[in-house]
Image (cartoon, grey):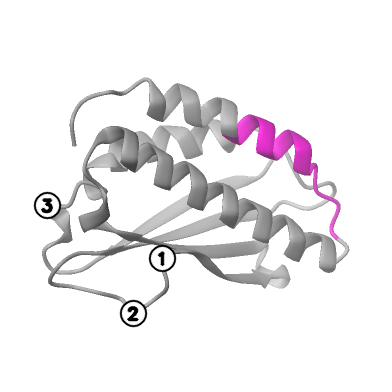
Amino acid sequence: MNKFSRYIKEGMRAKNSKIYKMEPLINPFFDKLSQNTYTKNLDLQFHFEIRIDTKNDEWGDEEGASNVKLFLKKGFIGASITLKDEKISSQEDLNMYLKQYFNDALNMIIIRLKKAKIEVEDEKLISDFNQYFNVYFNKHTQEV
């Protein structure tokens, strides 16, 4: 099986951000993805570092997905996702940005795995991702 993990890297005031409040939805979403296998003959951890830029704290990265790194000996591949808190005005906005940037990161990860000649069930991974995203995020309509 593969494992999916995340780390939210926030500035000093980001715990009040709209994005940080989504953390309770991200954990079960990744737990569900972790119940599947997407790489053949390799236990690989997919890790996403979510960086939150707020009005007072910025990481200096471009918004979106970036920094894909593969650590084959450690069984780890990771990508960074940077979100701008001030652009999020509603739950729908937040869901749209998260889905777009996670999809971008997944596609970058798939490209990197294929470059390293690692067999990845990319269609299944993207299909499961979109299905689970809709279950865990789009059905939660509370205001952020």
Q: Position of residue 6 (x, y in %)?
A: 43, 53
Residue 94 falls in image quadrant: top left
* Mark positioned earlier in the residue sequence (3 or 2): 3
Vertical placement of 54 versus 85: above or below? below
User: Residue 71 in the image: x percent, y percent?
Assistant: 66, 72
Where residue 100 appears, as percent x and y from the top left, is 50, 47
- Residue 16 versus residue 93 in the image, above or below: below
- Image-based side of 13 in relation to 141, left or right: left
Task: Mark 3: give few (<14), some (14-19) or many (20+) Cα within 10 Å.
Answer: few
Q: Distance of mark 3 from mark 1, alpha carbons?
A: 19 Å
**Which residue occupies the foreground of this view, 102 or 26?**
102
Q: Nearer the viewer, residue 19 or 26?
A: 19
The residue that disc 2 covers is: 60
Asked whether residue 36 is drawn in magenta, I would say no
Label pair 1/2, CB-CB below 8 angstroms: no
At a point 58% along the width and 32% down the height, the residue shown is 130
Callout 1 amino acid:
Glu
Q: CA distance from mark 1 to mark 2?
A: 9 Å
- Residue 2 is drawn in which quadrant? top right
Return the mark for residue 16. 3
- What is the distance, in whole Å, between disc 3 and disc 2 at their CAs? 20 Å
User: Residue tagged by mark 1?
Assistant: 63
Residue 125, given in percent of the width and then of the height, sits at: 69, 39
Q: Mark 3 touching mark 2, by CB under 8 A?
A: no
Q: Which residues are magenta?
A: 118-129
